[in-house]
Amino acid sequence: MSKADTSKPAVSLNCAVLTISDSRDASSDTSGDYLADSLAAAGHRCVKRAVSQGNLYQLRKVFSDWIADDAIQIILANGGTGYTHGKSTAAAVMPLLDLTFAGFGELFRHLSYLDIGSSALQSDAFAGSANDTLVFCMPGSTGACRTAWEGIIKEQLDSTHRPCNFGTHYLAGT
């Protein structure tokens, strides 16, 4: 299925991890821990990390600050995408995006369906880019973060993954 092109250098990306939760803090953020550890294992750097409650305007501030920060190339956000009355991730982030990648949400829900069945339809997972920063928003459970990372994001941040990937965009001179 996928192939690696060893003639291209592997790129190490500067990433930020945001957990959106009303019940977690830095000491109980297992999903943020998983994503930060996975980034490091893949050769990337987690240069910023935060836990924020789902307040629409607080989220917009964090995302806006990180999108405007030239040192951050990737944002991995978990939480606030499921079916609840207080979900606000999409409402906070979508207006900030220059482009959306519909395929991320579609593929995430497919992979999630294979794992949890029809409950996958309750996920509003999405991705896009703003100011040359890639933004991936996924559900907050560690299992969902694992599905998104292992099934999609890990390969797409790998500049040697073929036939295409997002990581190549950050190679010097491309």
Image (spheres, rainbow, N blue to C red):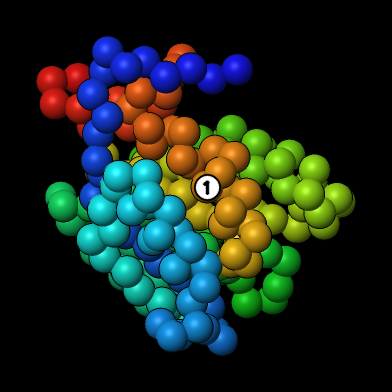
Q: Quadrant of the C terminus?
A: top left
Q: Name the residue that disc number 1 marks.
A: 149
Label 1 amino acid?
A: Trp
Residue name at image x 47 percent, y 33 percent:
155
Tell me if mark 1 has few (under 14), some (14-19) or many (20+) residues whose alpha carbon lies within 10 angstroms of its own.
Answer: many
Q: Is residue 14 left or right of residue 99?
A: left
Q: Quadrant of the N terminus?
A: top right
Residue name at image x 73 percent, y 48 percent:
112
Give how far across and how far down residue 158 sits, in percent: 37, 32
Q: Nearer the viewer, residue 34 or 121?
A: 34
Seen in the picture, residue 131 relative to 7 is either above or below; the reply is below
Q: Nearer the viewer, residue 35 or 20?
A: 35
Seen in the picture, residue 148 relative to 35 is either above or below; the reply is above
Give how far across and how far down residue 130 sits, in percent: 32, 44
Q: Is residue 71 left or right of residue 107?
A: left
Quadrant assignment, res 67: bottom left
Give how far across and how far down residue 128 sits, in percent: 44, 42
